Amino acid sequence: MASILIAEDERDIRDLIKFTLTYAGHDVTTASDGQQAVELAAEIMPDLVMLDLQMPKLNGFQACQAIKGDDRTGDLPVVFLSAKGPEAEDEQIEETGAIGFIMKPFSPDDLASRVNEILKQIGVAKS
């Protein structure tokens, strides 16, 4: 089981992601904005951080930069979630040090599969 932090400001989407990944066997913590995500990342030290790009207080890029800029959380793998394609912000994504991008909308099965692929790539095996 992996520990996953999800930051998504839209409650319905956040709840769907949490339900899907919990059902897939992961321990999921949620945040409703970028600032809360940064604080929770340092507190729980998750195996994976998933950040929506468009959030209040800190957007996904800003939250990622804050996480990557903190000595405690700088090595945490970050994946972005967005309804815009990654090519729209390719350069910014690369600059932040994020390891992946998941396009919305997604089916629950596709999301679980994609997250499990990412976890396998970073060496976090689901137990």
Image (spheres, rainbow, N blue to C red):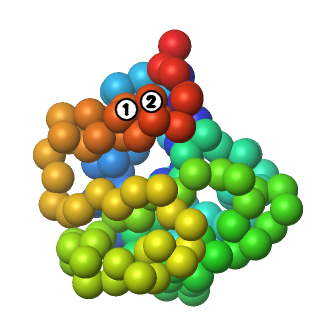
Percent of width and height locating residue 47: 61, 40
- Comparing 121 with 17, the one in front is 121
- Residue in the picture at 40% in, 57% down: 100
Query: Would you identify the image quadrant in which residue 97 lies?
Result: bottom right
Query: Would you identify the image quadrant in which residue 120 lies?
Result: top left
**Front disc: 2 or 1:** 2
Q: Which mark is residue 8?
A: none
Against 54, residue 43 (above or below) is above
- Comparing 90 with 38, the one in front is 90
Against 21, residue 97 (above or below) is below
Dot 1: within a 10 Å radius of its alpha carbon, few (fewer than 14), some, or many (20 or more) residues?
some
Is any part of residue 56 visible from this angle?
yes
Task: Give the residue type that dot 2 points to.
Answer: Lys
Please indicate whether residue 66 sits to the left or right of residue 84 in the image: right
Is any part of residue 34 visible from this angle?
no
- Comparing 16 with 89, the one in front is 89
Dot 2: within a 10 Å radius of its alpha carbon, few (fewer than 14), some, or many (20 or more) residues?
few
Q: How many marks?
A: 2
Please indicate whether residue 43 sits to the left or right of residue 68 in the image: right
For mark 1, give the secondary structure: helix
Task: Give the residue type that dot 1 points to.
Answer: Asn
Q: CA distance from mark 2 to mark 1?
A: 6 Å
Please indicate whether residue 69 sits to the left or right of residue 31 in the image: right
- Residue in the picture at 35% in, 78% down: 90
Residue identified by numbered label 2: 120
Residue identified by numbered label 1: 116
Percent of width and height locating residue 66: 69, 75
Q: Does the residue at mark 2 contact the one at mark 1 (Cβ under 8 Å)?
A: yes
- In the picture as drawn, the residue positioned furthest to the right comes out as 71
- Residue in the picture at 18% in, 35% down: 109
For mark 2, give the secondary structure: helix
